[in-house]
Image: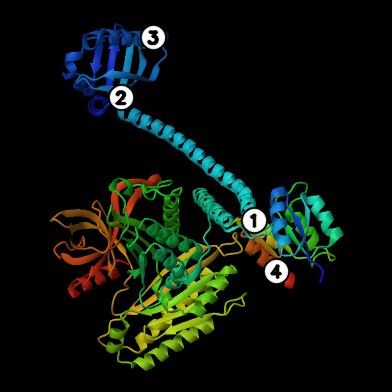
Amino acid sequence: MPKKRILLIEDETDMVYALTLQLEAVDYKVLSATDGQAGLDMARKEKPDLIILDLMLPRMDGYKICRMLKFDERYKQIPIIMFTARAQEQDRKLAQEVGADAYITKPFDSKVLLDKIGALLKK
Amino acid sequence: MGFQELKDNYQLLRELMDFIPDVIYFKDKKGRFVMVNQAHARGLGVKPEALVGKTDFDLFSKNRAIKMAQDDARVMDTGKPIIDKVERATRPDGVDNYVSTTKIPRYDNKGGVIGLIGITRDITRRMQFERLRKDKLSIEKKLEALEELSAMKSEFISTVSHELRTPLAVIKGLVTVVFNEVVGQINNKQKEVLQKTLDNAERLKKIIDDLLDISRIERNTLKLHYSLVDIIDLMKDSEVFFMKLAEEKHICLKYVYPPEPVNVFIDADRIRQVISNLISNAIKFTMDGGSIKVEVKILEAKVRIGVIDTGIGISKADLASIFNKFTQVSKLPGAENKGVGLGLSISKKLVERHKGEIWVESKAGVGSRFYFTLRRFYTLDMLGKSVRNKVSRLMKDGVSMHFVSLLILNCSEFRKRMKIGSKSLFKDLHAILDSVLQNAKYAGTDKQAMSVINPKAGKFSIILPGASNRQAANISSLLKYKIKQYFSSNKVEDVFITIGSLSYSQRVFSHDDGFSPSRFSIKEIYIGSEMRRFKRMSFKTNIKLFLPAEKVELSESVDVSEGGICLVIRHLLKTDSQLRVSFAFPENKEFIITAKVRVAWIRKFEILFGEDADKYKVGLEFVDLENKYKKVICRRLMNKS
């Protein structure tokens, strides 16, 4: 079975580095983009199995990317996990409104993230 | 004009002159008094006649007289009056005051100035008032500036904390990668080092969370997500965790619960946070071999949670500020004892947001007892786990929750005295409830109304999800009406039936949708020969508290319910200690009620901005209140409403 591909859209390069190491450790292939526009372009081109999306991004924020993918017949089946700040109700609400499949609050426990990814990919 | 008329007019003017408190005088062109009124003469301590022909130079200091003469000259030279001139003056008795003076010129019938009329009024009080108003304004301005500053600080803390999270998440992630040997094998010693790193990253995260909590509380952006939970269930969840923690320190940790479930409407996560904070503090500050007791106690209309330890205790000096921000009283060595000292102040705010009290009793070297209370809607205790879960689930979806509960007070006694057999009574009540439920078909909702019945305890409840306030109120009054009708058509002698009702309501925030507050309300209908127990009334009356060591404290106003009293006092009392009180209702001062009471809860009485007033608000429950007193209290409470 080919490796599942996860697209990571996150502007903190160190965060990308840390997450990539962890995801690769459990046998995912990781693609990454560090700004919003590049992330959206890559999502459309690569059609990954899952997207991890940060909220605050240069050039295009996470909500917009999520909306553009989720309201597009071609991409809407790709599961999206959003990073939100803990207990910011607006963030959660917005994430839900734009169609994110799950949200995870920063700083997160890597086990929680891996469990969420596993659950979404199984579906 | 006839003579009599002239005389009458003169009489009127005379009266005006003599009785007006303002000083009035007439002067000629040379500044000599032609006539002065009583007020002027009285102020100078002489008779009015004695002042005729005198000038201000004969009466006042030279400096002042010169100024007055200058004013006089100006009025008479220019013909323009001076109106309401405010001056400082010294009264003959030596007191400084403020006066307002008006001087207008007098003319003869050819239009030539012949003198002036002066009126002087003492405006000291007005000026004092004015000054107070100005002081108040300036204090308010300063306060506003302080509040703004405080808001900025909270905002700053919030921003900084958010910013700290990302690098912390990166650190945690990277260390985890190494720890899990993703990037190569490491030896045990290295693993140990990394474990410590992770533990401390976790601690840092906890501190940042606390900082964010406190800034959210201060900026009033913390929202509570209420649900209906059994507080005992909630505490049992973390029992194993704390048992293990205590065991590691060889501390004996014991939980004491009441036998029946205790349903409360709370934000479960937040109350869990409070309980965890208190228990982990207790473990932190208790030495090896000590013991900790965690207890849940049911009070009149509250639940009290207590964490009692045999730890290092808190010194008297620290006790006063223990719930303040950034207070860390531990002087023990060892990193694990340190923190930013926000835990208790967050706990206090969270408990207060739940309309509860939190307090502590402690003695250095002996141990500490932390307590807090939550409001308890005791008619909800009969709701089982499945109903509870259903209610909480609906509330999470933002559905409003309304409960209409029927409660028979002192049910077993009530049953004995009713001539309708218990069985048929409850069957009838059940039927009434069902028929009301039939009527509970409110429009626009697919949410099913539910009923929960516990005949043995005399508790009945209708749950109306998605109902509006008005619909709930209608159903409540319908139920009340039908119950009344039932008892009046089945008139039973010797049973005095009273029906009362109480309602509580609250806006709550549902879980996933922080911006649409749903409502929750409880309406309780009471039946019984006893009084509605939990109704509280305020009375202005004298109440005596007999304190230990033969001390007596007097208080003037008291809240009375059948279960106990609540008042503000100066003495700090110990939780669960017993004492005697005596009081009488204002309209029947001869009938003195004396009772033994137990201290159920106590908290510092705070005035504005968390300042202490050196007073305590205390809830005292009656212990074995004598029947004759009970009857008087019930009657009194009933009459008042």
Q: Position of residue A51 (x, y in %)?
A: 75, 61
Residue with the mark numbered 1:
B178
Badge 4 and badge 3 both on one subunit: no
Residue type at mark 2: give it.
Arg
Camera-nearest label, 1 or 3:
1
In the rendered structure, the answer to whether residue B474 lies left or right of residue B1 reads right
- Residue A12 appearing in the image: no
Camera-side residue of B16 and B303: B303
Q: Position of residue B410 (x, y in %)?
A: 30, 80
Badge 4 and badge 2 both on one subunit: no
The circle on residue B136 is: none
Residue with the mark numbered 4:
A118
Q: Quadrant of the N terminus of chain B?
A: top left
Camera-side residue of B278 and B254: B254
The circle on residue B121 is: 2
Residue type at mark 4: give it.
Gly
The crowd level at tag 4 (other Cα within 10 Å; few <14, some 14-19, many 20+) is few
Instruction: Report the Cα–Cα distance between label 4 and label 2.
Output: 88 Å
Camera-side residue of B598 and B72: B598
Residue type at mark 1: give it.
Val
Q: Position of residue B450 (x, y in %)?
A: 52, 81
Circles 4 and 3: CB atoms closer than 8 Å: no
What is the chain letter for disc 2?
A: B
In the rendered structure, the answer to whether residue B298 lies left or right of residue A1 reads left
Camera-nearest label, 4 or 1:
1
Instruction: Report the Cα–Cα distance between label 4 and label 1.
Output: 22 Å
The structure residue drawn at horizontal position 68% and vertical position 62%, both measured from the top left corner, is: A96
